[in-house]
Amino acid sequence: MNEISYVLLGLIILIITAIILAFTDTPQQIEDTDINILIALGIGLLIMILDRRQDRHIHDIIKTQNTIISEIHIMIKEEKKLLEEMKDQFKE
């Protein structure tokens, strides 16, 4: 939810700035430059949000893999113990 509020705030600021530039009497070159800056800021904001989401997603994947590896490790230890017991029985 936090990311959505950042996106909405950024979009509102971009829209307000674009409206102010449209109604003020600024030279065309300054207005074009400001619009280019606004577009770059919007893209940067989008990249930041997507990067945070991807980071969270990767963290969840790593956590799941760690759990699976721990379970496999426990299983292997149990199988090793069982094999050692069987080996000891055959020696007798």
Image: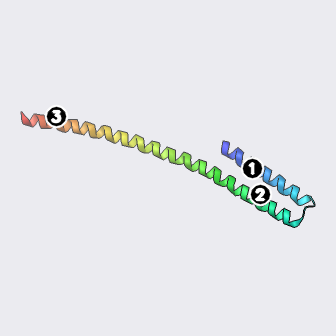
User: How is the structure coloured here?
Assistant: rainbow
The numbered disc on residue 47 is none
Is 91 above or below relative to 58? Answer: above
| Residue 71 or residue 18, whichever sits in front | 18
Q: CA distance from mark 3 to mark 2?
A: 71 Å
- Rendering coords of residue 64 (x, y %): 44, 43
Tag 3–tag 2 contact (CB < 8 Å) = no
Q: Residue at x 71, y 44 (%)?
A: 5
Q: Quadrant of the N terminus?
A: top right
Of badges 1 and 2, nearer the viewer stands: 2
Q: Residue at x 20, y 36 (%)?
A: 82
Q: Residue at x 66, y 45 (%)?
A: 3
Q: Quadrant of the C terminus?
A: top left
Residue annotated with mark 1? 10
Left/right of residue 3 with respect to residue 14 in the rendered view: left
Of badges 1 and 3, nearer the viewer stands: 1
Of badges 3 and 2, nearer the viewer stands: 2
Name the amino acid, label 2: Leu
**Element class at badge 2:** helix
Quadrant of the image occupied by residue 68? top left
The numbered disc on residue 38 is 2
Name the amino acid, label 1: Gly
Residue annotated with mark 3? 85
Is 53 above or below relative to 70? Answer: below
